[in-house]
Structure formats: C-alpha cells, structure tokens
Image (cartoon, rainbow, N blue to C red):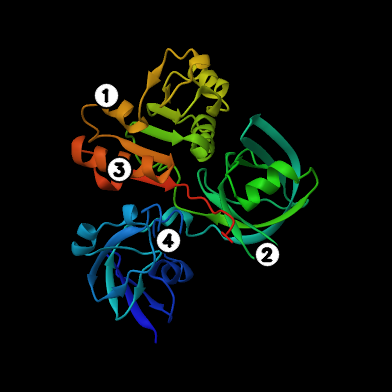
Amino acid sequence: MSHKLTIMPSRHTATVMEGETILDAALREGYALPYGCRNGACGACKGKILDGTADYGDYQDHALTEAEKLEGLALFCCARPKTDVVIEAHEVADTRNIPVKIMPCKVEKIETPAQDVAVLYLKLPTNERLQFLAGQYIVILLKDGARRAYSLANAPHDDRFLQLHIRRVPGGSFSDLVFTQMHEKALLRFEGPLGTFFLREDSDKPILLLASGTGFAPVKAMLEHAFHHSIKRPITLYWGALHLNHLYMLDLPKKWEQEHANFKFVPVLSEPAPEDRWQGRTGFLHQAVMEDFADLHDYQIYACGSPVMVEAAHQAFTTERSLPNEEFYSDAFTFSSKPKT
C-alpha cells in the first residue's frame, strides 16, 4: 500500500510505494533531501516526522537515540511510512539537476601512499565525463551484487580521472581485492554521483573541515574546488589519525597552507607512536576544535570519517559551542566486511 509524503516547509509531495523508504521516494521524485551512508549509520538524513507514523527500520543506535525518537526524529534512509506522513527537512537544491548514472570505468593507476591506503585513478570511456559536486561519492558495483561506497577525492574541474582513497579493512572484500589482486586496466562499474556532502557556496561563514583517516578524500576535493574558484572564506582543516603514517598525504595540506593565506592546517594524532617523534596536537579531533574555538555560532562545519568522530563532533559543537544544527554537514564512513561463516 502506498502513502503520501509531504515535505515541509516546501510543501512538496511524493508517493511512497510499499516497502520504500522516505528518502528513496523523495529522491525518486526529484527532491534532494540530505543524506550520506543510506544505511542508518551516519545520521545525515535525520529529520522530524510532523504527522503520521513510520517503521523506523534497521539503523545504528548512535545515529538515532531513543530520546530523539520521542522528539519525533527519524532516519529517512531507513524509515518506511505506515500512514501518510508529513516530514520536516531541508531540501538540497544543488544536486537536483545532476543525473545519477551507472557507468563503466578502467583502473588507470594504483598508488599506495601508506601501507593500508590505496589511491585508485579511474578513467571513464572516451568522451564521457561525470558531473558531480566536490564531496559527493560513487558506489562501486561488484559482480556478486555487493555495493561499496567511496568518496570522490578529486574536484570537478580536475576530472580526467576519478580518484578514490581506499583504506584496507580487515575482512573487507573489495579492499582486499584492491590490495591483493587489482591491477591497472581492470574494469569496474559504478553508480553516482550520490550524497549531499558538498561545500555550500552561498555563505560567507568561515569553514571548519574535520577529517579522520580517509575521510580526507572528499575534504581534499572540497578544498581543491575552493582554491580553484578563489573562495576567500577562512578555511581550517583538522585532519586526525591514530599514528603519523595514517596521515597519508601530509605534504599536500602543508603545501596548501603555504600557497593560500586563508587556509590553515591542524594535524592531530590520537595515539602517536614513539617513532613518530610527534610534537603536534594530540587527542580526539573534535576536542582539538573545542580547544581552539569557544563559540562556533558563526561557522560552517564539514565532518567526514568515522561515525564516532562525526557524532562526537556534532553533539559537542551544537550543545557546547552554539553551532546551529543546520550548519553541520557530515559524511560518516561505514565499512562492509565479509559475512561470518
């Protein structure tokens, strides 16, 4: 049985087919609601159900708490209406006219800037280009039907190759394939672009970027886009990792800092090894920001990486540093491993 979906405050309406999520129905009708992982892990699609009821679906507890459910909040990537529903959500107009495609590509080059990080350069067929916004992601379509999402690490103006940063995950079927079997000229298929994690250029607010691990990939794309278009807003990047070698492209943001007066780079290690001889910042990434900023009311925040980091930053910044909730944009990485046997 289908149900009517009304999106406030735009008053846009859509029909949600039986078994379909609120997010899928909205996207199918051309209404770009915010989203990230689409599997109940990141919380980017969280919004309020103003009227009606829904099945909340399967999601991770940190992305939607019981207290939030009592307030009427739901994850639209998981929630399926039981009745006609009215929701409150901020629509993202910038992605509406960008087509989502399924395309073939060829692995042009593989680099390994760190022992557990591979950089794939994907080449599209001749005369083909992918239209996307810096910060969006694509989904690699595997032969067994599995799907693996990776952020695009290149900016749209530099699209000769699509660049992906792949961290090797224990038991990860695709990352194991990349590190043990994949070779140049290998053929892949992907769907994209997807996601609403991209730089909002209609603001003059200073920008804070938080990246943990390979969460640097979409942030790299955003920064290269900002520099290419001479965006002069103050920009600070906090890039965090466990050890120094996990900051696998450390020279690049250092170079940007020398080239752009409006850009500052703050690397943070949570557990530096003795051989790192680290003299820089230590601890949790969001705490480094808290130490540097007493008030975030006039800032925009973009956070990408582990769900724990993203959630900790969102919670701390909105409750302790006066950050408006609508100025926090995120993309939380989740990992898929081989099923246990």
Dot 1 or dot 4, earlier in sequence: 4
Residue 47 in which image quadrant: bottom left
| Left or right: 186 as drawn, with respect to 67 | right
Dot 4 or dot 3, earlier in sequence: 4
Q: Is residue 217 above or below residue 140?
A: above
Dot 4 or dot 2, earlier in sequence: 4
Tell me the kind of residue under disc 1: Glu
* Residue at 30%, 29% in the rendered image: 287
Q: Is residue 313 above or below residue 194?
A: above
The mark lying in front, picked from 4 and 3, is 3
Residue 313 x %, y %: 31, 39
* Residue at 51%, 29% in the rendered image: 227
Q: Residues within 10 Å of mark 1 (few under 14, many from 20)?
A: few
Is the C-beta separation of discs 4 and 2 under 8 Å?
no
Q: What residue does disc 1 label?
A: 291
Residue 232 in view, yes or no: no
Tell me the kind of residue under disc 3: His
Residue 151 x %, y %: 55, 46
The mark lying in front, picked from 2 and 1, is 2
**The one of 105 and 285 positioned closer to us in this rendering:** 285
Task: Specify the label residue 314 is tagged with.
Answer: 3
Task: Specify the label residue 144 is tagged with.
Answer: 2
The mark lying in front, picked from 1 and 4, is 1
